[in-house]
Structures are given as structure tokens and as C-alpha cells.
Image (cartoon, rainbow, N blue to C red):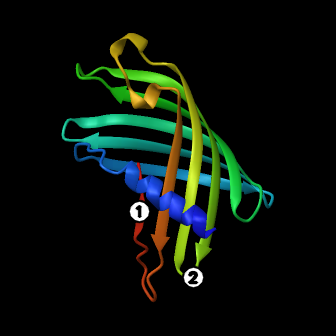
Amino acid sequence: MKALLLFTVIIGFSFFGHSQSFEFWNSIGAKYKIGKRLTVAGSFTDRINNRGVKAFFPELTSKLKITKWASVSIDYRYVSKKENNGNYLGANRFNFNARFKNSYKRIKYSCRFRYQMSSGGAPNQGYESDFDEAFRFKPAVTYNIKKSAFEPSFSNL
């Protein structure tokens, strides 16, 4: 597991540096546990910048816990993103995820592997990361501060 942590940190730093304008990300959702290993969830997320609502997407998720440290899930997300002309462009997106997590003392670390595919959008309008077909990797590290409600974390977007 030490090798997994080191690999996660190195890969995370190699992807560090993507710059975006200042945005607020808001999300609300609910989840329901069906048995010990299966969870279903629904959420609604929006991204707001200085021009108003930049994007919004409702999402449905089904997650299966395989072991204490591994789970798989499938997500359906309808992505609606504002174009430069003010119109919204929508697409259906499916995500297939595998997540692995562990901890050592007060440090938690995890990594998520995702395959995403989309239908819809506007293929002739140029590249748009929310509407593409891609493999993604998201490492994360969290530190539990003793006697504190705060848990600083680091992950790549």
C-alpha cells in the first residue's frame, strides 16, 4: 500500500497546474443504502462563475462495495453547459468507476479510475472535456488533524 500512496502522489503532482477561472461549485443530493454493499444516490450540481450558471448536471449513481478497500460504480449524468453565446449545450454521460482506498494512521489515500462516455453535445463545436470519451485518474490524500473538525485534502480535478 505504500507503493500505491507514492504512485498516487507522484501522478497527482504531474497533473497539477490546470488553471480555471474562479467558480463556485454547489451540490445537493441524497443516498440510500440497499443492504450492506449496494448504495444508490442522486444529486444535482451547478457551477457558477461571474457570468451566472456555467453548468449544471443531475446525476444518478449505483455503487457496489466489493471489499473494505475497493468499490465499483456506474453514474448517469445529464450535463448542460453554457456556451459563449449564452445557450446551453446538453449531453448524456455515463461514467464507469473503480475506486481503491486505504489509510495509514491519520492519513487516508485513495484513487479513482474512470471511463466516461458521452452522447449528445455538439461534435463540430470543438473539444469539450465534459462531453468527451476519456479515461481519468483521480488520486486523493486526506490528513485527519488530531482534535479538529478539519481534514485538509489534496486531489486533482
Q: Secondary structure at mark 1?
A: strand
Measured in 3D between alpha carbons, the distance from the residue under mark 1 to the one under mark 2, in whole angstroms, is: 17 Å
Is 11 or 115 nearer to us in this picture?
Answer: 11
Residue 73 in the image, given as x and y percentages of width and height: 67, 45
Label 2 neighbour load within 10 Å: few <14, some 14-19, many 20+: few
Question: Is 130 rendered above or below residue 120?
Answer: below
- Residue that extends furthest to the left in the rendered view of this protein: 50
Residue 83 in the image, given as x and y percentages of width and height: 29, 23
Residue at 43% x, 74% y is 151
Residue at 70% x, 57% y is 70
- Circles 1 and 2: CB atoms closer than 8 Å: no
Question: Is 148 rendered above or below residue 57?
Answer: below
Is 51 or 12 nearer to us in this picture?
Answer: 12
> At label 1, which amino acid type do we have?
Phe
Q: Secondary structure at mark 2?
A: loop
Quarter of the view holding residue 114: top right
Residue 105 badge: 2
Label 1 neighbour load within 10 Å: few <14, some 14-19, many 20+: few
Looking at the rendered image, the quarter that the N terminus falls into is bottom right
Residue ID for mark 1: 154
